Image (tube, helix red, strand yellow):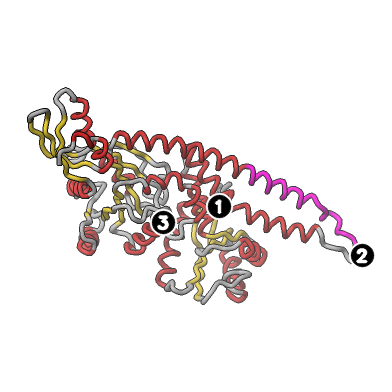
Amino acid sequence: MALIERSFREKIVLVGVTIPPETIDDTDISLDELALLVDTAGADEVGRVTQRRDAPDPPTYVGKGKAEELRELAEATDCDTVVFDNELTPAQQFNLEKLLGRTAIDRTAVILDIFAQNAHSQEGKAQVELAQLRYRLPRLRRQAGALSQQAGGMSAAGGARIGTRGPGETQLEVDRRRIVRRIHKLEGELKDIDRHRATQRKAQRRGQLAKVVIAGYTNAGKSTLLNTLTDAGVLVEDRLFATLDATTRRLSLPGGESVLVTDTVGFIRKLPHQLVEAFRSTLDVAVDADLLVHVVDASAPDVAGNIRAVHDVLGDIGAGDVTELLVFNKADLASDEAARHVKLHEGSVAVSAVTGEGIDRLLESIGDRLRTLTNVVEMVIPYERGDLLAAAHRAGEVLGETPGEGGMRLRGRFDDVTVGRFREYVVS
């Protein structure tokens, strides 16, 4: 269900509207990013139109005069599609296509198209298809409404026009019902996957390994970092949304403790609501995390904006309060910028996932952050319970152990769940 034709490189005109509190600079940065998205989707920018408004125009978003200017540019450049950086309503999209005489889509449609290209797992494909169908359904209804008016149109003689009765509307209603059924089926499949994922999470919790999640803006280098840390072998490409499927690997920290590290789908400004909802089960891994390693591209043109965009999505999914470690990646490309941002954000780390610069410091920081979330306790474990002694070593960081009366006296850092599990052996 591609929204951008890929048998050839489509020619695209981009449209950005600045509406307060957004500034013109914000719009320019967002349009530059949209151009990258369009390129990733397999098309080329051939023109750009911008406008300042206090509010969107209800019929065409940009207003009648600007829409006419846009039509003239579209004809002059012979573009195939006009892409709005702002989200269009189904009515606005319909009106624009009628006026422009060509396809009009928005940023959401482009991102959905890219996700469709990059989803490989069963879950990822189902999530993307669900998001596309939720996006398409209200637009299909708008189309059905337009054809319904045509079908009900009266001729000069007072009768219905020949060739406009019924079938078009009937077929659209059939399509609508088919989409609704498919949405329900996909929702059911994803609920089953979510239940399986929840079972896996319970098993991981029983293993008492801390959960570290790598999050960040798209193309910030998250997959490269996971590969560097764990030799995960995840596909790495220098393009937006190259990785959609979460990957989890085990990682040993310098203190000897092991953690589970998970890579997540990249975030972006104006991430479509449909995608946030469809990928909620995948993104829940961030909600359950003990520590979020927030990877930031230090060489990006708007580092602060990228950080805000990630924080917005984390807040939307309920992960805004999870402990965060900021990691400024690509220090090999922007060493001065990385160093400046580390100074601005206390406790952050500068790394290069490609060269390995700063990785040792990062591992130490992960260990330090996780230790702040644990309790230092002492316990005495009977000598005959070697299984419990081994479990304690797996569950936390053992700081020291000495033989004593009645058992091995052990001092270490453990989370609340582990302390509760060993309650009868805790002495302080």
Q: Earlier in the sequence, mark 3 or mark 1?
A: 1
Look at mark 2 in the image and give the residue it sits on: 157
| Disc number lying in front (1 or 2) | 2
Q: Disc 3 marks which amino acid?
A: Val
Magenta segment, which residues? 158-181
Residue drawn at the location 46% of the way across and 74% of the way down: 20
Q: Earlier in the sequence, mark 1 or mark 2?
A: 1
Please say whether residue 282 is visible from this viewpoint.
yes
Cβ–Cβ below 8 Å for labels 3 and 2? no
Residue 166 part of the magenta segment? yes
Give the structural element (helix, strand or loop) at label 3: helix
| Disc number lying in front (3 or 2) | 3
Please say whether residue 357 is visible from this viewpoint.
no
Please tell me how crowded label 1 is: few (under 14), some (14-19), or many (20+) other residues with Cα within 10 Å: many
State the mark number for residue 4: 1
Look at mark 3 in the image and give the residue it sits on: 313
Give the structural element (helix, strand or loop) at label 2: loop
Q: Earlier in the sequence, mark 3 or mark 2?
A: 2
Gap between marks 1 and 2, in whole Å? Answer: 43 Å
Residue 125 part of the magenta segment? no
* In this rendering, position of residue 64 left or right of residue 252: right
Residue drawn at the location 41% of the way across and 56% of the way down: 313
* In this rendering, position of residue 376 left or right of residue 91: left
Q: Disc 1 marks which amino acid?
A: Ile
Quarter-of-image position of residue 402 = top left
Q: Residue 29, relative to residue 249: is it above or below?
A: below
Cβ–Cβ below 8 Å for labels 1 and 2? no
Give the structural element (helix, strand or loop) at label 1: loop
Q: Residue furthest right?
A: 157
